[in-house]
Structures are given as C-alpha cells and as structure tokens.
Image (tube, grey):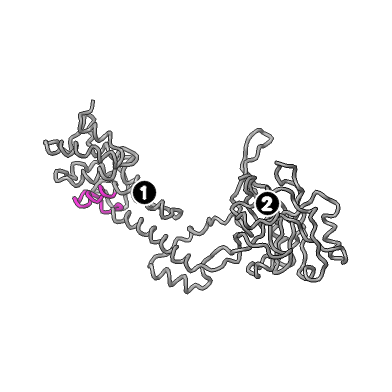
Amino acid sequence: MLKEWFWLFKKIKSNEQFGEYQPALQNMLSEGQDIHERDAKGRSALEYIFAKPFPCVELVSWLLSQSSFKPAKEASLYPYSVDLPKGHFQLTKANNMMDKLDELMPSARCGLEDITEKARLAEPYLRLLTKFEQAGLTNQYQSGSEFYRQAFANRLESQLQLRDLEAQFDDLCVGFHMLAAEYDNEFQSRIAGAPWLPTPDSASARANLDLIANDESLRLALQINFAQLQGRNPALPSKGLLQVYLQEPDEGEELTGRCEAIFWKQADMESLNWVKCQHRAITGDYLAPSGFDVSHRRNGQYPLSWKPYTQLPACEAEITAVIDKNSLEIDPELYTDLYYDYGLMPRVEARTREVFTEEGEFTEEPYLPENHIAILSYLYTDFGSSLYSIPVDALRGDETDWRQLTHTFCND
C-alpha cells in the first residue's frame, strides 16, 4: 500500500485534481515530507508524474518551484549521459522525456489549435528540461529546451504568416464555389428546373436535340452559362451554355443513370428561338443543394452564381514582402492539401468509396474515374452528392467535347 504522499501523486491526473489535492501536499511538505522520497521500487513522486501519458503541468510546476527541490536528485529522468561525446546518441532509457518532446513537435500540417494543444502537452517536459539545464545536468550536444520552444514559435509564426498572405489572396482561375443567386433568365446557371430549348429550325439545333429526343426519361440536372465565369478559367469555354440531362430515378432512388450533355454556343443562344420545356424538369425537390437558402428556390430549381476560390497573389514581390516582414519562410507543404471539394472545377482526387469485391471484401476506390478531371461537384440536402467529370484530353476550352461528360453519385 503506497503511503499518502505517493498515493496523492498517483491520483492527480489533471490541473483540476491538483487544485483539490494541493493543500494536502503543501501541508505534508510543511511537516517535513522529503520531496525526493522514493518508494520500495525506487521511484520518486516526479517519476510517478512523468510515467503518465499527459503529466499535469501545474503539478510539475509546483514541485519544481519548491525550495527543497534538488534537480540532481531527479537527474535519472534525463535520458542522455551528460558526458556523451558529440555525434553519439546513446540513451540511458528506451522510453524517455526527450522522445515525448520529439513526438509533440508540430508538423507542417498542424494548424493553430493543434500547435497550441501540442505546446500545452509539451510544457511539463520543457519545464523539467529547463530545470536540468539550469543545474548543468544536460548534455550540450543534445537538443535543449530553447530548441523545442523555438520549434513551436516558428510553426506558430508560419501560421500567422499564412493569415497575412491570405489577406492578400486574389481570385483563383482554377475552381469556383457555388453561391445561391436570384433567378435571372432562361440561361442562368442553375441546378434542376425546366430547361429552355430551341425549336428545331436549324441544323445545329437538330443535332443537339437529337441527343435527348429518343429518351423521354432524360431530365435537366443542371446548366452552366460559361459567360458568367468572365473567362477566369482558360480550361473552360469562355461563353456558351452547357445543359446536362440525367434519367430521372424512381422516388427514393439515387441519380445513377446515364448522363447526356448538350453544349449551345453563344451564337445559338442569341439567334435561336427558345421555348420552355416543362416536361424535361425533374419532379420533386430532392436535388436541393446543401446550404442553399430556400428563398432562392424557384419551383424546384436552384439558380447559381460563382465565387472564385482564393490563391496567393500573382506578384512575387507582394509575397516576398510579407515573408520578409515576418523574417521566416512558410513551409510549402501547408498548401498541398487544400480542401476544395465542391463547386466548379473542384479538387476531389482524394475522395474514395468502399466497394464490395467478388471475393467478399471491401476495398477503397476513388470516386473520380481514371484520367478524368472534375468539372462540378455539389451536395444534395439528403442524398449525397453529384460529381461530373470528363476525360482530361476532352477538356479543351471552347473546343471541349462535352459528349464525354460523366456523372458519378457519391455517398456522403
């Protein structure tokens, strides 16, 4: 049975518990308790603390601040030999406080919250290491407390740099967020609703209309008026109207049928005789895009507007000025996994689905077909999301072959 001194240290696992037991610990010290006393297994109270996954920082600080605390009596917690020569890294313990500090060092992926949390967890180890350094009990060739504190400071500074840079971001010519917009005209970019189609008075009209003429189950899933993008994305057409049709599913079923895409040139939009085709509208309201305000709905259709994603300013001098101001370099890895999963020209390569194989096992497969580039992805309110993609070599600006457009339903 542990005596009360060790029993209390074993019980304390948080700052709140330390506040509860601190008066009792202080009374024991006042009555002559040896702060470095060891139990039958040779362990001190401080060793009890650091044997826990997350040592209590206030408890550690309280111990280190006591006038009776002698760092040399706890030197066994420092894993390196003080006389270890330069270039040698032999440890005296396999599981040690320096390993813990290395594990807590923030990576390039850490955001402000992660950095703050890791710094909090590292603080007990850093305070003990500082105490050892002040007493001359550490090896000069091993990393010291200043090295670890600087690592946290540098990573925090990088995050602050990112905020400064992001304030200077410009419009990105790669992707676009979708925002709800008021309905404008029959050529407004939108999801669902009744399409406007021209009468078959010309060869171009008849050629496009033939794509859907023989299948009455095809309904307008969406249309994009590329002129509304104002030429920001050179991979897409500068003008024209893309209409995408899907086979309307039975009630409660997913949109998994084939996809037909019709592209109308700007000249067609201006010269042909357009009429509303209500029978090509999807019935029901299940295509409602997630997050769209109900006030923007017009009889089951959802007008769209486009807001570009953001990117670094094109002028290198502006970027350099901000970096120089902070005197540190931003880690480029921080920009490799930007989360632009939805909208026009989204980045969805990493999104995968579970597929049941013939062998009776599940495997992860990408939603995006091989050698395809995503054109549009948006969330439904209830069902999941639609992903429209096209082979990379078919996307050629105004000369894009939209007949190769593919629809994939994604479970979310």
Dot 1 alpha-carbon crowd within 10 angstroms: few under 14, some 14 to 19, many 20 or more: few
- The residue positioned 64% from the left and 59% from the top of the image is 344
Q: Which mark is on residue 370? A: 2
Q: Quadrant of residue 275?
A: bottom right
Secondary-structure class at tag 2:
loop
Q: Which mark is on residue 102? A: 1
In space, the residues marked 2 and 1 are separated at their CA atoms by: 40 Å
Q: Nearer the viewer, residue 120 or 230?
A: 230
Dot 2 alpha-carbon crowd within 10 angstroms: few under 14, some 14 to 19, many 20 or more: few
> Residue 92: x, y in percent?
29, 41
Secondary-structure class at tag 1:
helix
- Please say whether residue 191 is visible from this viewpoint: no
Q: Is residue 127 magenta?
A: yes
Q: Which residues are magenta?
A: 126-144
- The residue positioned 63% from the left and 69% from the top of the image is 232
Q: Quadrant of the N terminus?
A: top left
Q: Taking 150 as reference, is 158 left or right?
A: right
Three-letter code for the amino acid on which mark 2 is drawn:
Glu
Q: Quadrant of residue 13?
A: top left
Three-letter code for the amino acid on which mark 1 is drawn:
Asp
